[in-house]
Image: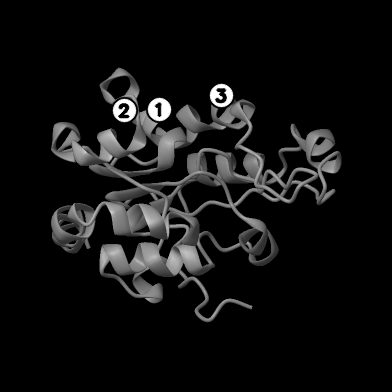
């Protein structure tokens, strides 16, 4: 069970409530997931109410998030919350922070135990429709190459490192970030400018929107 349950708020407006219900029932990738090494069923995970000003655009839920149903309920989430300067209670407040990954379900593992990429079908089916339900968002945290490809388009650089290094180019509406996975610990050591320059700006921007 997660350490902190999401706080209770007023019901979402009917249009968002309808979209969430449709998403919860989506089985478009059921056969694809059943054929993975994990042989799991779809379980879409998202968070947000229309009042949210901050959007976290991640990659896809991992296995632990698939089990809990709570986005970023894992060590990656701990690191991301540290970058943002928020605690779990604040992070899981849907009235202030929306979380829409590029794929809403855990993609599964391949035969070697490696993460499969987010299915492109998911973004094509759902992303534009759901983004329209969050009119107050004025800053998108684009986490990883998939989110950067969608939200930054041709403005992104050839590599994730160069995209993040030139983060000021995408302000004020978007901020490219590396994925907070433990697998990127080496990247963070090789690029100390990220925690010296980007993280302080991020914390200030998040605080201003909360």
Of mark 1 and mark 3, the one earlier in the sequence is 3
* Label 2 secondary element: helix
Between marks 1 and 3 in the image, the one whose residue lies nearer the viewer: 1
**Which residue in the protein does label 3 denote?**
124
Q: Which mark is residue 149?
A: 1
CA separation in Å, label 1 and label 3: 13 Å
Of mark 2 and mark 3, the one earlier in the sequence is 3
Task: Please indicate, yes or no, whether residue 137 appears anywhere in the rendered image.
Answer: no
Quarter of the image for the C terminus: give it.
bottom left
Question: Is 196 above or below relative to 15?
Answer: below
What residue is at 29 percent from the left and 26 percent from the top?
A: 156
User: Which residue is nearer to you in this view: 92 or 157?
Assistant: 157
* Label 3 secondary element: helix
Badge 3 crowding class, 10 Å Cα cut-off, few under 14, some 14 to 19, many 20 or more, is few
Question: Is 53 above or below relative to 152?
Answer: below
CA separation in Å, label 2 and label 3: 16 Å
Q: x%, y% of residue 81? A: 35, 67
Badge 1 crowding class, 10 Å Cα cut-off, few under 14, some 14 to 19, many 20 or more, is some
- Left/right placement of residue 175 relative to residue 106 reads left
Q: x%, y% of residue 27? A: 76, 37
Quarter holding residue 80: bottom left
Q: Which mark is residue 25?
A: none
Q: x%, y% of residue 38? A: 81, 51
């Amino acid at each position: 069970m997660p350490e902190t349950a999401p706080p209770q708020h007023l019901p979402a407006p009917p249009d968002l409530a309808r979209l969430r219900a449709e998403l919860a029932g989506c089985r478009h990738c059921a056969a694809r997931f059943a054929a993975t090494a994990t042989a799991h069923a779809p379980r879409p995970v998202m968070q947000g109410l229309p009042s949210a000003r901050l959007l976290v655009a991640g990659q896809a839920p991992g296995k632990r998030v698939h089990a809990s149903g709570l986005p970023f309920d894992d060590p990656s989430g701990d690191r991301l919350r540290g970058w943002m300067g928020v605690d779990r209670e604040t992070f899981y407040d849907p009235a202030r922070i929306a979380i829409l990954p590029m794929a809403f379900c855990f993609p599964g593992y391949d035969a070697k135990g490696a993460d499969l990429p987010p299915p492109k079908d998911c973004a094509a089916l759902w992303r534009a429709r759901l983004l329209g339900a969050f009119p107050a968002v004025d800053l998108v945290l684009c986490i990883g190459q998939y989110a950067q490809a969608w939200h930054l388009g041709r403005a992104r650089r050839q590599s994730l490192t160069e995209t993040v290094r030139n983060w000021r180019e995408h302000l004020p509406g978007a901020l490219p970030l590396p994925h907070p996975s433990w697998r990127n610990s080496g990247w963070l050591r090789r690029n100390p400018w990220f925690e010296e320059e980007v993280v302080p700006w991020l914390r200030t921007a998040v605080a201003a929107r909360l």
